[in-house]
Amino acid sequence: MTSPWRPLRTPLFRNLLAADVLSDIGAFMQTVGAAWIMVSLRAGPLYVALTQTASALPFFLFALPAGAIGDIVDRRRLILYTEIWMVVIATIIAATTIAGVMTPWLLLGLTFALSAGDAIESPTWRAVLPELVEKEDLAAAAALNGIEFNFARAVGPALAGFIIAAAGVGAVFTLNALSFLGVIVVVARWKRPVARRTTPPETVLGAMVAALRYVRYARSLRGMMLRSGTTMFFASALLALLPSVARVVSDSPTGYGVLLGCFGAGAVLGATAIPWARARWSTETVASAGVVILGASTIATGSLHSLLMLTPVMLVAGAAWIVFISIVNALMQLLAPNWVRARVLAVFMLVFQGGLAVGSAVWGSVAGRTSVHIALVAAGIGVIASVVLRGAAQLPDTAADPSPWNHWRMPVIVGDSPLAVDAGPVLVTSEYTVRPESVDTFLEAMIHYARLRRRDGAYSWGLFRDVEKANTYIETFLVSSWAEHLRQHERATQADRAIEERVLRHVDGAPIVRHFVSASTA
């Protein structure tokens, strides 16, 4: 088992991790300050819950284009510019609060703007992780990021509670604005190698379409996203309504900070326990157990009315939360190939944060119409019930190899002038001579092969039997342009090898491949 501390030997990763600790502590302090202002303004549970919606909604709106941009432009510059944006917004929040002109709707708008910067940065931030450490340290680096984030979750809220009590909310917002400076300095000094492209660059719209197409035909990823979004829809009630719970059990910002700090401390413990648990039980068992415990903790939060009794519940809830989220997030990074990783993570964030945003608004509305107790109990039951999705989306114990497998022959183009990259559509045909006794198994294997073709760029696919030549089958697929077909050559992965070998196992000789381009654009 790889030590989770080994990536710290890499100076760039170590410096970024240290800077990120301060930034995330500031972010959690900001969350506590924003929620407490809402409570102090007597805005009601709906407005309190909408604070989390304003934080999560930008991820739903901007995650996909942000992921596409992160796979096209220089990732270092994108991170740097978004960090500067967030410094500016955080400074405005601090200034308006200190000036005494903050209102519920102004706070929601500024919270949305601050979170928008994070939403645009996050897919790229996660996608650069393989560039910071060696491949064998990637899992350990991801674990360290989880520990760092949840350490900040444990420290930030409690620290915010004490600072609010001593110096007011404006001081918390000011410290959050300063917390971005460390990340800016480290990223500005990062000498990231310039990536060299062997294929034409994608457009933002084309990259977004490619991401959605990839997720659509990658069943394992799609299933995990369905589970994450459903679970987060119900689980969102716990954090969205926690300020209202804290208001009842402790009429002080310190009480809310303690509860959220316990949640973060529990998440740190849960993150360190994941390797131990997965060494003993299957991935699915560990993740499902985390979901059930999280649901039970949500029910308990709505039923208990003592700060002393709620603190251990928050510890358990934080551990259960991070177990499920860390497992699913790690699988997403391991299953997505590099060319589409930022976009896949963006789609995952879209589903994940969309569940949080919609769930926070729904459960805040339920609490406003009924009570916080009823909303939390109902949401907790929903969290537990979401485990039934394991039947349709089982979490794998091992991830397939997503490294490139560029083995297809590049066509030799005839003619005096090169083929334009935007020429298209392009028709690709493959002729197979299938053994008579293997026709049925060949046809079954081609169903899986078709999914790979569509996943990597084909918008139409077909398989035909030649009526004039016995045992001859023609596979056809259409791609939008010559550039998109060139990208297909780089999108095949080592995990696809078994599917292609299964097809060729029933074929005599190598398939005959031909390429055709639309005569009107050639």
Image (cartoon, grey):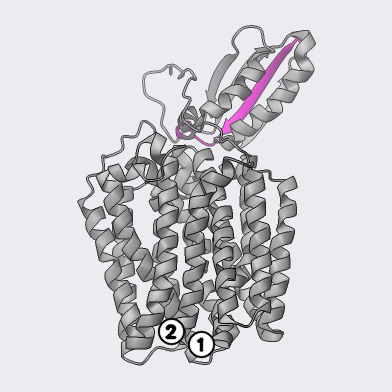
Q: CA distance from mark 2 to mark 1?
A: 15 Å
Picture coordinates of residue 115 (x, y %)? 43, 68
Quadrant assignment, res 160: bottom left
Specify the label residue 39 is tagged with.
1
Say above or below: 283 vs 429: below
Residue 106 shown left or right of residue 6 in the figure: right
Q: Is residue 88 visible?
A: no
Identify the magenta region: 468-483
Residue toward you, 162 or 27 = 162
Q: Amino acid at mark 2?
A: Leu
Outermost residue toward the left?
189
Residue toward you, 515 or 65 = 65
Q: Is residue 505 visible?
A: yes
Q: Residue at x 29, y 50 (%)?
A: 14
Q: Secondary structure at mark 1?
A: helix
Residue at mark 2: 106
Q: Secondary structure at mark 2?
A: helix
Q: Residue at x 56, y 80 (%)?
A: 307
